Amino acid sequence: MQALQERIRTTHLPLRIRAGGTKDFYGQSLAGDILDVSAHRGIVSYEPGELVITAKCGTPLAEIETLLDEHGQMLGFEPPRFGAASSLGGTLACGFSGPRRPYSGSARDFVLGMEILDGTGQHLKFGGRVIKNVAGYDASRLMTGALGTLGVLVQASLKVLPKPQSELTLQFEMDEATALKHMNEWAGRPLPLSASAWQSGVLFLRLSGANNAVREAHAKLGGEPHLHGTEFWRLLRDHEAAFFSGDLPLWRLSLPACTPPLDLDGKQLITWGGAERWLKTNAAATEIRPRLAASGGHATLFAVGEKSVGVFHPLPAALMKYHARLKKLFDPRGILNRGRLYPDF
Amino acid sequence: MQTRLADFIRDTDDGREADRILRTCVHCGFCLATCPTYQILGDELDSPRGRIYLMKQLFEGASITHKTLKHLDRCLTCRNCETTCPSGVEYGKLIDLGRKHAERKAARPLSEQIKRRALAKFLPQENLFGGALKLGRMVKPFLPQTLAGKVPANPSHPDKGELGGISPSARHPRKMLVLAGCVQPALAPQINVAAARVLDAIGISLIEADNAGCCGAVSFHLNFQEEGLDAMRRNIDAWWPHIEAGAEAIVMTASGCGVTVKEYGHQLRHDTRYAEKAAKISALTCDMSEVLLNEEAALRGWLSGRGALEGKRVCFHAPCTLQHGQKITGVVEALLTVAGHTVLPISEPHLCCGSAGTYSLLESEISTQLRDRKLGHLSAAQPEVITSANIGCLTHLQSGTGIPVRHWIELL
Amino acid sequence: MISPDIIRRLQAILPPHCLLIAQEDVKPFETDGLTAFHSTPDVVALPETEDQVKAIIALCRETQTPIVFRGAGTGVSGGALPVDGAVLLAMTKFNRILSIDPLARIARVQPGVRNLAISEAAAPFSLYYAPDPSSQIACTIGGNVAENSGGVHCLKYGLTVHNILSVRVLTIDGEELVIGSEALDAPGYDLLALLTGSEGMLAVTLEISVKLLPKPERTQVVLAAFDEVEKGGAAVGAIISGGVLPAGLEMMDKLAIEAAEAYSHAGYPLDAEAILLVEVDGTQEEVSEDVMRVREILLASGATDIRTAKDEAEQKKFWAGRKAAFPAVGRLAPDYYCMDGTIPRKALPAVLKRMAELSTEYALPVANVFHAGDGNLHPLILYDANQPGEWEKAERFGADILEMCVAHGGSITGEHGVGIEKISQMCVQFGNAELQAFHGIKACFDPDGLLNPGKAVPTLHRCAEYGAMHVRSGNLPFPELPRF
């Protein structure tokens, strides 16, 4: 830790924060010398009865999830891993959440506390290790998804959830519009849903809960059980499913779940009950972004493709003003992950 | 809450009572949620907690103006806040004290004084009110709309009413007194006839005492509190011989009167001559629904013997004086159901209809908004008949809808 | 004191019934749900339109006049306490539900809408808004956003921050920002999280989109009585590590039971030292399984009496008592002081034991209401404000409790916010650097410090003073700061 602080304090050049390096593909641009945080690892405390785990940010996700699993618990936001080395810090910095997100919550929803090193190397501790804590501004959640531009994440406390007794994946043949309608209608009913996706005429639905509850919900909904449900969702979560391969740019579209099918060139995969849609396309950003903005959503050029179009959806000027001020506050010299989120950031 | 009452009141009966009530309030604000005027105006000064604070200032000796009085006047005295209050603040009693002392400290504009004086003189006197009502009905077509709306149409004539006939004679050994009231005999004489017939059918005769009249609420709540107390004493004197002769109860067919008579004991507690009698009278007072609840077996017997009634889809608007004042909930609905009607659920059943005694005449804008809000909820259920349990609510609601509005007892 | 010129200009913005100036009219706004603190406002604005709000903000910015926001005034940390020379801006007239979209499960509401009114309006669609602070009948959603309010169902359903999608706010610069979106995320920093719980210090909320959840098919409440508080605490841990995630998990001690029972007649066992209320929800089958497991665990944990609510009416009664427990304590003493510390649950026995000792030391009774599932304690210190010195004693007792929570790895506030009340304890929970960061965040949005000044984040000087009063084991906090 001292070494990291020293490095930040003394550098005159931008630093690029990196642990496992599995998400190097993500973000606007990679600038500066690597600040390797992978050695800052280990689980600090874990009390299953408290539903809280605290770990240093270089800890691989796999290590955390293995430990939780031994106690029948899990990370509620089902984070993706883009390689065995994916770390807790990288996941939180990107704010990535997996298929369970619309039903259980996002990465930031589970963050209880965060320790960071700001752009001057100062060690700051926000939030805490208890489930409820509203003292001070919620800087821990502000750090989640900030792509390391406001600080180097060094330690985080997360709320965890008990694992469901059983899970079952169902498949239904239906077109996109019908699938969207069902995903939203069912989400408004008391069903033990934990994931949903649609691709190429098939709706996939995951049920999680007590054995009886899953069985009864299956009886209510019908659908064909998927024989390899667990693997199906893992491949989808980690972008190992066939949909994600190929050289076309991959766009992540985030939009209100009820938005009708988007008429955009390329192939689409719908996740998050309709609120997240993946698009493999050559279509121009100037075609995609206005369409999303019109639906109240935004588009991210997630992987592959020419980044000069802007990886992240541009912000309105008024909002950008407050972003710039926050960046200046936490990283006055602008050295942390500069340019990763927006140019000049 | 901390209190520091001023010298002028601290060591008086009123002061001790006000201090006791104020100190139970913890200022949590729950009462804002169910206060009708706050729902409409969104100003805390028109909420129970705001009024409590205004009264606290008054009792602590701050100088006040007619504005405090105005906020106190705007209170419907529906006492919904008492039902909501977890700390048990006796708001109804506090606002009586508040109004009394606020009026002493801050004069009302003259025009309002005259209006209130006239109402207090006029409404409680059955003959005066009845005569004027006839006159009002004759000239109604020529009145401006705001006033015309306040003149109720002729009730179905008792002789031709659904139940037909007139009050049965006092033939049973079991007897109960009934209060005729002030405006009800003129506006809706059929209500007490219906009550008498139902009770007669289950073996109880209903009698009226000569000389009993207005329960005192009209004057009392217009802040002519002494006149109100006189009316109470007069009624006690009128009822007392009948009580001694064995009348079991004093039956109220208007819940507004009921809540008042049930508080005679409290209002006259410092009157050495009347305190004991008043307490006894209050203890014997029952709403019509309570009487029938106590006589459930006889009622069921009579209803089954009478054969099936044509069941109607009805809504019941529980008057504030019934549900919040007397804390009687669900009884009338149950009785209507037992009698074969379908009682439809409504939204915001706790909220006042805006009638509130003379309120509809003095604060007509708020009153009309509340009436229309209430009628919106009532008519959403698409009832054939709207029922209620207080003469004020009945006429007030009827003034805004084409759906018949009746006292529930008429449907039994 | 606010200048007559500003009053005149406010009069030009607002009609007479929306502007309170006379002492008689403004005095009732001198305090919120925390009556121990009061300060008569100079002027109270009750705007009816967004244009009026904008004009007031512009006027205040131009004249450097501070603004304190107020909703229903049910907060219990003094967040809406008026500040000298400020405009008290009450948003209560913005009480309309703008739209409910049952398919999208979103309600758009104005900030003055009552928390419970949202669930009532969503009920015909079998949806509801999950956070349910005890004051939900009266508190406004705008206030909930400002305080990041919780409730009895936080363990499973989260706080306000987990249940709102976007807010439209107005900054002191007069800029209207839409923060968050009706999608599940928005580009850029998570300003929604930053604004939620910011206690009216960063911006004023004009509109809120909240997430609605499907009403569970079934809920069931199990009430368990214990002859020792510690056993109840241990049962909570056992339920959670047993794999059940209850919707609500509440504990009350003897004094709280007594008060709540007097108001609600819920049928709480009056001879118990503590009761636990365990609510499980979900589908029919889930609930049946969970109730069985919960009962087994409670039995094994030494519960002396276990009751399952026989119908919805009884469930409502069980909860009614709990929800009204705070004000119901008003029946036991003229005043109470409600604390809001959180602790890791395992620390409960130690904390309760020490609290009982403190209660004896201070000679003030304390009733305990406890969101046991998420470690959120609500000790209610009973006192009599009319007795000289009692409030000061209660305040010191409260401070001791909060600082004990921090010492056990907890927090000084779980859901009520810091406001004015816990501002000194912020010095105990956070170091100099973090407090400076908070002041920095404030300055990003409100460089002149006009919005709700003096709340939520203490000045470093204040902390130095407070530290001087609290020298412990010879170590001064903030030794780098000059002492006074």
Image: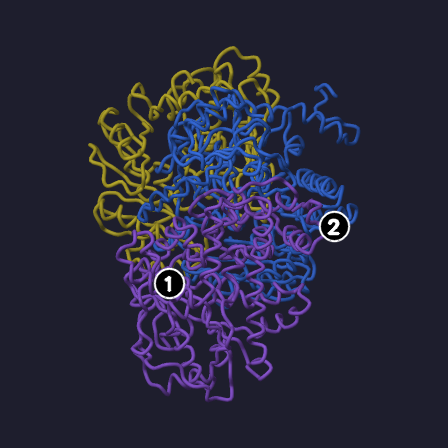
Chain colours: A yellow, B purple, C blue
Residue at point 27% right, 39% down?
Answer: A269
Relative image position of residue A112 (x, y in whole percent): 54, 38
The picture quadrant where one finds residue C239 is: bottom right
Which residue lies under the disc numbered 1? B132
Task: Give the vertical position of A61 relative to A8 (above or below).
Answer: below
Q: Which amino acid does label 1 sit on?
A: Ala
Identify the disc placed on residue C356.
Answer: 2
The spot of residue C370 in percent (x, y) is 61, 51
**In the structure shown, which secondary structural element does the residue marked by tag 2 occupy?**
helix
Dot 2, how many residues are within 10 Å of its Cα: few (below 14), some (14-19), or many (20+)?
A: some
Q: Report whether C270 appears left or right of B355.
A: right
**Quarter holding the C terminus of chain A?**
top left
Foreground: disc 2 or disc 1: 1
Q: What residue type is labelled 2?
A: Ala
Asked which secondary structure carries label 1, the reply is: helix
**Quadrant position of the N terminus of chain A in the picture:** top right
Name which residue lies at 58% across and 80% down: B241
Q: What's the CA distance linking mark 2 and mark 1?
A: 69 Å
Q: Which residue is drawn at 51% across and 24% down?
A: A151
Q: In the rendered image, is residue B267 in sight? A: yes
Q: Mark 1 lies on which chain?
A: B
Q: Residues within 10 Å of mark 1 (few under 14, many from 20)?
A: some
Q: Closest to the observer: C285 or C9?
A: C9
Question: Do discs 2 and 1 share a chain?
Answer: no
